[in-house]
Each structure stands twice: as structure tokens, then as C-alpha cells.
Amino acid sequence: MKKINVLICIALLGFTMFSCKKDNANSSYPYAIRMTDAPGPYTAVNIDLQGVEITGSGGKTVMLNVHTGIYNLLNFSNGTDTLITSGTLADAKVEQIRLILGPNNTVVVGNTTYPLSTPSADQSGLKLQVHQTLQAGILYSVLLDFDANKSIVETGNGTYKLKPVIRTIEAALSGAIKGKVLPLTTLAFVTATSASNETYSSAVNVNGDFLLMGIPAGIYSVTVTPVLPLLPVIRTNITVTTGATINIGTINL
């Protein structure tokens, strides 16, 4: 059965992107949306992507920055994918993802190109129900599994319609480390270092809190480096697991 897999990753756009400049008091949830596909009976399935909208709690919506244009979903198969959008959410709830399509959607069967009618998308977009609760600092993915045998319908006379039949599969991709540094108002940086010397850093905010985001599962040492004359403090053997935020408690300088 032909399936089009659209991979939606709640990602940090590179683990080191969120550095010591980030104030952890204001939680944010970066999104990166990628597309991938699987082989099927069509020569091409071209989607005219114009926008992506996320609906959170209370019906609040945010538009993500999208790489607009025509995407042949069949170009992204056998493990290949492409980034279509990225952005940052202020809401921990994701209730719906709406794909906004333009008019230039087509399906190619053999050597013949047919318009792919999307009446619902023209009016309000392709609405995908997610119902996901995010934790700050955790990377997530949502795999949208399109069943093309049901999603692309031949209506006769060489006309095709897109009526998406989609299954959503959610997964976490990383973990996070949080804690508190005393005394309050101390200027300090916090760095987690892996066994392979990969580092992930952030700053302590005015309330003494810190959050190290987007950390792959593994064992880390955490170093709190304050301004002199205070000395660094190191915690070792911190185990990070996928989908969880580990609280290492209060660190007294």
C-alpha cells in the first residue's frame, strides 16, 4: 500500500543553537517540519505548499516560516527528507497542524499530469489533529502517515482529488536537564558535557533556574561556572533519557 510519510520533528534546529543567551524563564518550543515519502504507484505527487499553521490551547494559532513552493513528495523516499518549515512556539499544547496549499497541486500517472483537486485545502487547509503536550527543552517528532491509496482519489475523466487519510505517530527525540543555582542573582553559565566531549550550554536566569535543552540520551557531567571569586561546581554521572527532563536539584556555589 502506497504511503506518503511527512515527518514533523519538534527540533531545536541544531542542539547548540540555544546557548547561554537563552533566558530559561520564558519557555519556548522550537519546531522543525520535514517531509519524507515511500515508493508508490505514481510517477509524482506534487504539493503546492504555501503555509503551515499550528493551533495550540484555547484555539490560539501561530504561522511558521515555510519554504514555499512545489514539493514532489516522491523525491523524498528511502530515508531522504527535506526541511519545509521551522519556528518557535510559545504554547506547550499542539492541538492541530494545518497545511495551507496553493492551487498548483498535481499527480503524475505514467507520463500524464493531472490536476490534484484539494477543495478543503483551498478553503481552510489540510487540518491534521495532533493533541500533543510539549515539555520545554525536549525534541519531539510527529510522523504523519498518509495512505495514498485512500488519500488520492480518481473521480473519473482524468480528475483526481486529495482527500487525506492520515495516521499520526508521536515520539520524543531527546531529553533535557534542569536545576537551580544559589545564591540568587549569581551570574553563571551551565554546561553539560558528554563522554565524547559534546557540550550543551545555557545561562542561569535571575531566579536561579537553568534548562539545558535538546540533549541526546546519554551520561553527562554538568558544570556550573560562576563569575569570580566563586568557583565552578561539577556534578557527574547525570543520566539523560529520551522524552524526560531530569532535575538535578539545587547547586550551591
Image (cartoon, helix red, strand yellow):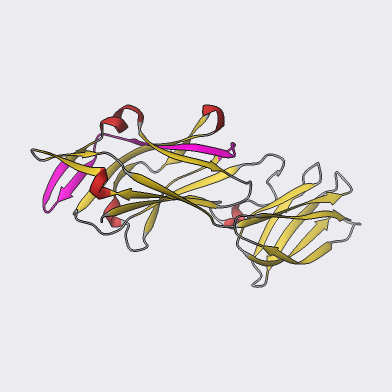
In the image: residue 91, left or right of residue 154 = right
In the image: residue 16, left or right of residue 76 = right
In x, y percent, where is residue 109? 14, 50
Please tell me which residue is depicted at 32% across the width and 59% down the height of the picture: 77
Image: 134 above or below 224: above
Given residues 155 and 178, the one toward you in this image is: 155
- Residue 69, by quadrant, is top left
In x, y percent, where is residue 196? 64, 72
Indicate whether residue 217 is drawn in magenta.
Answer: no
Image: 35 above or below 132: below
Given residues 19 and 11, the one toward you in this image is: 11
- Residue 242, by quadrant, is bottom right
Q: Does residue 227 appear anywhere in the picture?
A: no
Please tell me which residue is depicted at 51% across the width and 28% down the height of the picture: 59
**Magenta stretch secondary structure, dominant:** strand
Please tell me which residue is depicted at 56% across the width and 32% down the height of the picture: 57
In x, y percent, where is residue 42? 19, 53
In x, y percent, where is residue 29? 58, 43
